[in-house]
Structure formats: C-alpha cells, structure tokens
Amino acid sequence: MVIILNSHADENDIQSLSAALASRGHRVFCSLFHDRYVLSLQAGAAIDEQQIKAFDCVDRVVAVDTEYRLANRAVKPEGTRITVGQAEFGGSRPVVIAGPCSVENREQMLRAADIVARHGAQVLRAGAFKPRTSPYSFQGLEERGLELLAEARERTGLPIITEVLDAGDVEMVAGYADILQIGSRNMKNYKLLKAVGALDKPVMLKRGMASELNELLLSAEYILSGGNGNVILCERGIRTFSDFSRNTLDLNIVPAVKQASHLPIIVDPSHGTGRRDLVAPMSLAALACGADGLIVEVHPEPDKSLSDADQAIGEETFARLMSQSRDVLSWRTQNDPTPVNSFN
Ligand code: PEP
Ligand code: MN
C-alpha cells in the first residue's frame, strides 16, 4: 500500500500518521515526490483504508500489487517529471545528454562540452570515476575530473551528470554533479543505492547488463524509499549472444517501463551498441519508441578516446543526429507511441 499525502501535509501530520501505522506493526518509508510526501509500508497488520483516509493529510491510498511500490505507475499515473536546468525528464521534449565517456584532460573536456552545447544537448556527461573491466585501463581523473566538469558547466551553462562508483564518494560527487549516475555494474549495489536515496539530487539509474525489469524497478525503489523521488531510469543494453555488438539495446523495455512505472526512462545507444556506426540509428529508434531522452558519448577526436573509443561519435555525426532527432520528435508528437490510456 502507498499513501499519498496532500501537498500541505507537514512534519506533524507525517509523524502522527506514521505513529498510527507503526502501532499496527508497519515500518513506514517516507519519500518526497516533488510537491508532496508519499508513504510506503513494509508488512504489518491489515489496514482499514477508511481509517487512513480519515487523516486530513491523506490525499489518496493506492493499492499496488507489485513488490516495487513507489515506482509503480499507479502512484503517479500522469508520470514523473524531473527538471534539471533547461532539461525536463519525462516532459514533452526528450532530453539529450552528451559528452565523452571519460574526463581525460582540460582541453578534451572543454572541447567536448563546446561541441555538445553547440548542437543542442541539454546536459553534459563525462566520467571522473570509471568502472573499467581491466585494472590496467584508464581509471578516471577522480576529483580533478569533477573540477573540470564543473568548469565545463560554468563555460557552457549545461548541467552535468557523472558516475558515482562508491557509497563513500557520494558526498564528494554530489558536491559537483547536478545528476548522479549509477552505472550498470552498480545497479545492485544496495549500499550505494541507499546512499543516493538519502540525497535530494536527481539520480540516473542504469539497468544492470543482466537485470530484469522487475530488478531495475526494485533498485529504483531503494532510492525512492530512501526519500529521493528524483529517479531517471536508463536502458544501456544487455548481454546476449550477439556477435556483432557490445551489448543488445533492449528497446522493448521503454514501453514496458512506461506501463509499469511513472519514472522517466532514457536510452544509452553508445554502451547499448558499442559501435559508432550504430549509435545514430538506435538513438532515433529509442526516441521513436517513446524514450524520454538519450545519453550519447561524443568526443572531439573519437579515435583518441581513452575509454570506449569504438562507440564515441564526433561532432559531425552528433550534429546530424540532433537534426534527425527533431524529425522523429515532430512525428512523435502526432503519434504517441506509449499512450497512457492504452495501458491495460
Ligand atoms: C558510462 O556511462 O560511463 C558507463 C560506464 O556506462 P555503463 O555503466 O552502462 O557501462
Ligand atoms: Mn563509456
């Protein structure tokens, strides 16, 4: 059960309602969803809905039949919108996040930032802490990388997203980033999920490369139930037997998430394909099937990328992609691929 409070509910209201629920053996999780608090409950004695509704501060009670509760579409049938700078995730205009895989040095970072800003990206990406398969690969510039990202934000006006790898770094990374990224390898790092759940900054949660939809939404639930209602999901490809691409971009999950959850979902065609030549077509496919945005790796000199060179696109391809995206989007405004009223 999920209890949605009125937007004017205050601390005292929450306390008295929580106390009443606790006395019936419930553990209460309280989250802030933009303008209102939402309570979710962990098992306890059966509750009489009428008794809950009798509390003035209660707007409505939602019965959910999934293990994830706060992430369930029924909690916010109109969908969640998350605003960061000029970008609105879950709004009518999909958000393009772009930038290099890693922050490599000042010149590369600023050049990349200028390119993506020039062609209309709304958020700048780059990793300062890199989860690399090999310990011998470039591991990222860490805090120096965060400083360079902040300088690039200052210069372009674009908000920044960057990955946090470890719960111990959350405070530091949150001191710089506008959106924290949880990478595919960490989708089930529950300590990290709890740490970002305690923030009020937006979090982009990437799907684990071998994770099910239910698992993705339960990982989102860790963040939501920790109190942070600003979760953006990201499909980044899953492991399959594909012998021609790094991963298989599972676009099926986009309309499936739209049915199951109110959270925005964006798509990463760079990691999802691992191939520069597949990035633009799969970006367009993602937008066509209803994605709330893209996250794309763009580098001023793609072949020289210190990480993920094979999937990095350069300025020309990015510029073309941005203009093609606009065509897909105008088509999409006439042909909503995921109309909410058909979800049954
Ligand atoms: C990234 O976006 O920089 C990244 C490491 O992606 P993923 O976690 O999807 O592998
Ligand atoms: Mn990468």
Image (spheres, grey):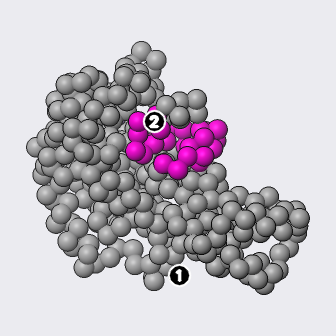
Answer left or right for 261 relative to 227: left
- Residue at 16% across, 66% down: 327
Residue 219 can be seen in this image: no
Q: Quadrant of residue 284?
A: bottom left
Q: Residue furthest top?
A: 136
Q: Which residue is mark 1?
A: 344
Picture quarter with the N terminus? bottom right
Other residues around mark 2 within 10 Å, as few (<14) / some (14–19) / many (≥20) = few
In terms of depth relative to the viewer, which is nearer, 190 or 31? 31
**What is the three-letter code of the residue carrying label 2?**
Gly
- In front: mark 2 or mark 1? 2
In terms of depth relative to the viewer, which is nearer, 46 or 53? 53
**What is the three-letter code of the residue carrying label 1?**
Asn
Other residues around mark 1 within 10 Å, as few (<14) / some (14–19) / many (≥20) = few
Residue 82 can be seen in this image: yes
- Residue at 76% across, 63% down: 15
Q: Quadrant of residue 159?
A: top left
Lower sequence index among marks 2 and 1: 2
Q: Which residue is mark 2?
A: 175
- Residue at 68% across, 77% down: 58
Magenta segment range?
173-201
- In this view, 269 is above or below 166: below
**188 drawn magenta:** yes
- Give the SS element for disc 2: loop
- Residue at 18% across, 52% down: 120
**148 drawn magenta:** no
